[in-house]
């Protein structure tokens, strides 16, 4: 599915795989996932790197 | 919702993004993930960058960072962006200095479409103090930007990077490409707005001389 020089790759992934991406950043920033969710839901994430991550993490929280 | 429909819609959206990304990235690579809960994520393949959502631009050290989270509308006909984040990230700090964000249903007092700026904001600190609020970083403010329907797009952001010469275009005709892509976006949004506000649109069309009639009533069961 290439176009020009770019490339699009479709995948079916588990939420666990997505969670692994999130957890890697959280580990570097020394924060637990539970605390991250708590602060994110309250819109109280003051760590800018974690704020950047919040929208990606949102896909993990559907129905949670 | 079938996974294929979700991935097909995401692929179509992503191919449109590539047209824009190719203006500032040598070989943009996108991942479309079906995460199995009715939602898809479109994001850069960051395997070579090592930071979620980051994509190298033509300027070393200046990364583009973005995610799109989406689903399909209840009919399964249209891709619906639930959240998006498009930002300028500095490689060494891994922080976004500027981020255009859309978070559908963010909160009663927060704009769905907004801008975050990460910078020193001493004067903003004064505003917070005068309004009896605790000091907080500038990047936590949600600066409204266009509302749900006409929010800034990837095209706008890439144009900003190019116009301010933060990145170098890969093609001389980047303005024409962006103009064409913006036209597509505006038409897509106009159609969505027409579906949502059909009576108002019909009234406007009639005032312009169009003959517009409501659809027939569905047969009663």
Image (tube, coloured by chain):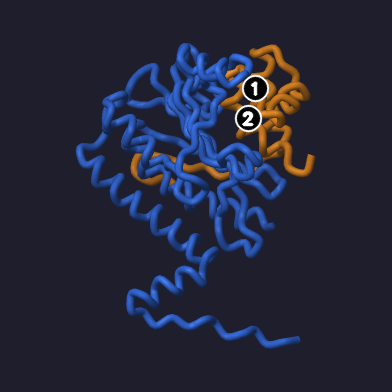
Q: Are marks 1 and 2 on the same chain?
A: yes
Residue named by callout 1:
A45
Looking at the image, is A55 positioned above or below residue B177? above
Residue B177 location (% of width, % of height):
28, 46
Q: Which residue is at 33% across, 30% downward?
A: B161
Position in image of residue B160 (x %, y %): 33, 33
Task: Work out whether residue B206 can be spotted.
Answer: yes
Q: Is residue B191 left or right of residue B158?
A: right
Q: Chain of mark 2?
A: A
B155 above or below A32? below
- Asked whether the beta carbons under mark 1 and mark 2 sit within 8 Å of each other, the answer is yes
B130 or A33, which is in the foreground?
B130
Q: Quadrant of the C terminus of chain B?
A: bottom right
Quarter that holds the N terminus of chain B: bottom right
For mark 2, give the secondary structure. Answer: helix
Spatial distance from mark 1 to mark 2, Cα to Cα? 9 Å
Q: Nearer the viewer, mark 1 or mark 2?
A: 1
User: Measured along the vertical axis of the image, is residue B55 above or below residue B110?
Assistant: above
Q: Which residue is mark 2?
A: A54
Query: Colour in which chain A is shown?
Result: orange
For chain B, give the colour: blue
Protein chain holding label 1: A
User: Which residue is at 65% across, 47% downward?
Assistant: B39
Taking depth in this image into account, of B94 and A20 the one nearest to the observer is B94
Q: Where on the picture, by quarter, is residue B73?
A: bottom right
Q: Is residue B55 visible?
A: no
Q: Position of residue B220 (x, y in %)?
A: 72, 87
Which mark, residue B56?
A: none
**Element on which disc 1 rests:** loop
């Amino acid at each position: 599915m290439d176009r020009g020089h770019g490339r699009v790759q479709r995948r079916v992934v588990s939420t666990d795989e997505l969670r692994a991406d999130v957890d890697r950043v959280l580990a570097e920033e020394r924060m637990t996932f539970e605390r991250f969710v708590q602060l994110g839901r309250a819109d109280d994430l003051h760590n800018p790197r974690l704020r950047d991550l919040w929208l990606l993490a949102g896909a993990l929280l559907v129905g949670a | 919702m079938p996974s294929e429909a979700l991935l097909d819609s995401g692929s179509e959206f992503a191919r449109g993004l590539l047209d824009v990304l190719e203006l500032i990235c040598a070989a943009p690579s996108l991942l479309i993930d079906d995460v199995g809960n009715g939602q898809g994520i479109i994001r850069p393949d960051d395997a070579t960058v090592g930071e979620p959502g980051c994509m190298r631009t033509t300027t070393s050290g200046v990364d583009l960072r973005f995610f799109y989270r989406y689903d399909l509308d209840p009919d399964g006909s249209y891709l619906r962006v639930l959240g998006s984040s498009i930002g300028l990230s500095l490689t060494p700090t891994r922080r976004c200095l500027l981020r255009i964000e859309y978070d559908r249903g963010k909160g009663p007092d927060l704009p769905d479409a907004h801008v975050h700026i990460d910078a020193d904001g001493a004067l903003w600190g004064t505003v917070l103090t005068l309004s009896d609020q605790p000091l907080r970083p500038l990047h936590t403010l949600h600066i409204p930007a266009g509302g749900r329907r006409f929010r800034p797009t990837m095209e706008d952001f890439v144009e900003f990077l190019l116009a301010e010469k933060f990145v170098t275009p890969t093609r001389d005709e980047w303005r024409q490409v962006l103009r064409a892509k913006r036209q597509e976006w505006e038409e897509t949004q106009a159609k969505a707005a027409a579906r949502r506000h059909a009576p108002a649109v019909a009234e406007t069309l009639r005032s312009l001389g169009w003959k517009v009639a409501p659809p027939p009533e569905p047969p009663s069961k």
